[in-house]
Amino acid sequence: MKNKNSIDKTLASLFNFDPFSILNRKYEPLPLQKRDNVEYEVQWQKTELEKDGHKVIHIAQNKICERIMIYRMFFGDGWDEVDINLGMKVISNDGVMVPDPNTYLVFDTEQKHLRIADIRIEGDQVNKGYGTILMNAIMQLGNELNVQCITGWISQVDWDHIERLTHFYKKFGFSCEINHEIKHGTIIWKNADYIREDKI
């Protein structure tokens, strides 16, 4: 503990603030536009996102009656078709929570290959159904983009819940190749339509 405090103080002096506080910060929900009117808020948030040039790609309700909005961010920098960033808004009677942007995908437009670069669902976001809703949005996006396959990898940082993670991906039709020795895994989903075309 003494060493950790020393490291924290050193980093704080270098950055003029505690960089770990960003990782541990809690967000207060933003108030609804109309009290106790979640449906109005969903439509309002959708309109605002579209005004900013983004696109809502999926809206669903989780097991604790929150409305989860997944939206694709567009930056107009020429990379929007390749670097795909998904954001999430969690809307309930308590207000609107906007977790840090948490999903990064890379799309090879020629090979029709969508790669999951990073999905961040951490801390108190776990076990609320966000992952399932997010993966449904990714699969829907893959369908819209007519992808041939979706791939990704599982790193050492996920190894304490590897069984839960492989079960999660298999539920969506991914095959999982896991190497327990080096604590690394790959996931792959193949579009059955492309497989059928290859056999014709």
Image: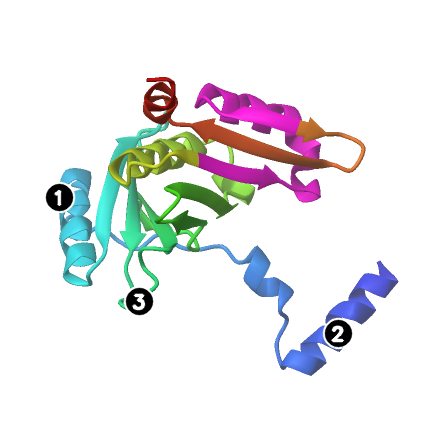
Q: Residue at x 13, y 53 (%)?
A: 47
Q: Are marks 2 and 1 in contact (CB under 8 Å)?
A: no
* Residue drawn where x is 35% and y is 49% of the image: 109
Where, by quadrant of the figure, is residue 136 drawn?
A: top left
Residue 130 seen in the current view: no
Neighbours of disc 1 within 10 Å: few (<14), some (14-19), many (20+)? some
Q: Which mark is residue 127?
A: none
Q: Please name the residue that numbered disc 3 is placed on.
A: 78
| Relative image position of residue 24 (x, y in whole percent) | 58, 56
Depth order, front residue of 166/186: 186
The answer to whether 95 is drawn above or below residue 61 in the figure is below
The residue range painted magenta reads: 150-177
Tell me the crowding category of disc 3: few under 14, some 14 to 19, or many 20 or more residues within 10 angstroms, Cα based.
few
* SS at mark 3 in the image: loop
From the top left corner, tell me how far across and down residue 89 is, in percent.
Answer: 32, 47
Q: Residue at x 60, y 34 (%)?
A: 186
Residue 9's tag is: 2
Q: Relative to 67, is 192 on the left or the right?
A: right
x then y, percent, for residue 85:
38, 54
The disc placed on residue 40 is 1
Given the image, on which type of amino acid does mark 3 rest? Gly
Sooner in the amino-acid sequence: mark 2 or mark 3 = 2
Disc 2/disc 3 C-alpha distance (Å):
41 Å
Tell me which amino acid carries mark 1: Tyr
In terms of sequence position, does the residue under pointer 2 or pointer 1 come before the other? 2
Q: Nearer the viewer, mark 3 or mark 1?
A: 3
Question: Residue placed at 76% from the left, 30% from the top?
Answer: 180
Which amino acid type corresponds to the residue marked 2 in the rendered image? Lys
Magenta span includes 80 = no
In-front residue for pair 137/117: 117
